[in-house]
Image (tube, rainbow, N blue to C red):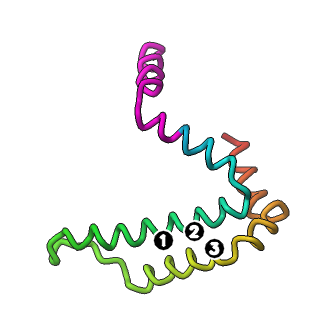
Amino acid sequence: MVRVARTLEAAVRSSAVAVVVARARREARALTAIDRVRLAGLLVLTALVTEQLLIRLIPAPLRPMPPAALRYEIALAAIVITVMARPIARAWPASRLRRLTLSMTSRS
């Protein structure tokens, strides 16, 4: 088991993806809280648009089709997060959701 762990550690150290992820994390930490919230909203919107573009490559009878309302709700939530970034970032330190996520991560 130790050998497997060492092999995985060596693979991560030499992985180009790991280097990109580490660089992105460092750069994200340098952003203000408001910019990080905006970035989250923009990433969700980008993922939604990308999914819609890629889904066009699949033949119509084989396409997975979640309800249109779900796509609209996700897009609306991402837009609200992006536009309301300042109040969301300001409210986050005192929010119940933050306390819940902190308690979940401290259990692990």
Say whether residue 86 is magenta.
Answer: no
Vertically, is 15 above or below 29? Answer: above
Q: Which mark is residue 34?
A: none
Q: Secondary structure at mark 3?
A: helix
What is the quadrant of residue 47 in the picture? bottom left
Mark 1 lies on a secondary structure that is: helix
Q: Which residues, given as a range, are shown in magenta?
A: 1-21
Task: Determine whether the residue tagged by mark 2 lies in a helix, strand or loop.
Answer: helix
Nearer-N-terminus badge (3/1): 1
Position in image of residue 91 (x %, y %): 81, 68
Q: Are dots 1 and 2 in contact, CB under 8 Å?
A: yes
Position of 96 with respect to 18 (left or right) is right
Residue that badge 2 annotates: 41
Q: Residues within 10 Å of mark 3 (few under 14, many from 20)?
A: many
- When asked about the image quadrant of residue 61, the answer is bottom left
Q: Residue furthest bottom?
A: 69
Judged from this view, the residue extending furthest toward the right is 94
